[in-house]
Amino acid sequence: MTERQEARRRRILQASAQLARRGGFDAVQMREVAESSNVALGTLYRYFPSKVHLLVATMQDQLQHMHETLHKRPPQETEAAARVAKTLMRAFRALQREPQLADAMVRALNFADRSVSAEVDTVSRLTTAIILEAMGLEGPPTPEQLSAVRVIEHTWHSALITWLSGRASIAQVKIDIETVCRLIER
């Protein structure tokens, strides 16, 4: 992308996030995103063919920002499992501060079909990178470690869904995250 295209994409993602913060998934309407980001509706659809594409890209953007923040201020715990749990709970608390945005992004992930698979894969790779970085490995991960990371990622996603739906408290989410992160120690 050119610098101008990247700036346009950034405006679109910011408008999407802002609308989602105010009203969740239903508040993100493509026409309003186009107006808020000062782009033509056709241009918006060239960047993002659907609202689901847009909100999954918004989640990518949020995760990238979170990854950069965690890179600047990594967790200080001595054990890898504790560092990963701390990292995921920091991410969870960031989402907790913006529950409408979190709900919109998670709903988009859940609604994503095959046409959004590349974007969903990017979300997964970012989440994996965040977990691996928190682990502090001194080399490439083993197949067993990658398997543990996938299970941790699935648990984190599930915990987010159950919290958003009101079926789990933050305390329960923390217990679940700390429990699954112990897989790293094996």
Image (cartoon, rainbow, N blue to C red):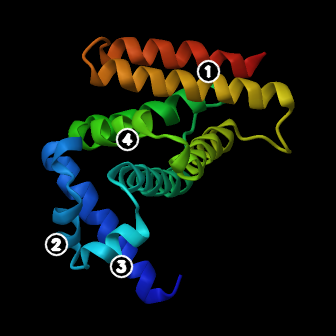
Among numbered discs 3 and 4, the one appearing first in the sequence: 3
Q: Nearer the viewer, mark 2 or mark 3?
A: 2
For image coordinates 50% across by 26% down, the residue present is 156
Among numbered discs 4 and 1, the one appearing first in the sequence: 4
User: Disc 2 marks which residue?
Assistant: 35
The image quarter containing residue 159 is top left
* Amino acid on which disc 3 is placed: Arg
Q: CA distance from mark 2 to mark 1?
A: 43 Å
Among numbered discs 2 and 1, the one appearing first in the sequence: 2
For image coordinates 41% across by 72% down, the residue present is 46
Among numbered discs 3 and 1, the one appearing first in the sequence: 3
Q: Secondary structure at mark 1?
A: helix
* Amino acid on which disc 4 is placed: Ala
Tag 2 near tag 4, CB within 8 Å:
no
User: Disc 3 marks which residue?
Assistant: 8
* Amino acid on which disc 2 is placed: Glu
Q: Is residue 184 above or below residue 52?
A: above
Q: Secondary structure at mark 4?
A: helix
Taking 179 as reference, is 40 left or right? Answer: left
Q: Nearer the viewer, mark 3 or mark 1?
A: 3
Q: Is residue 159 visible?
A: yes
User: Disc 4 marks which residue?
Assistant: 108
Taking 66 as reference, is 95 left or right? Answer: left
Task: Name the one closer to the observer, 83 or 37.
Answer: 37
Q: Nearer the viewer, mark 4 or mark 1?
A: 4
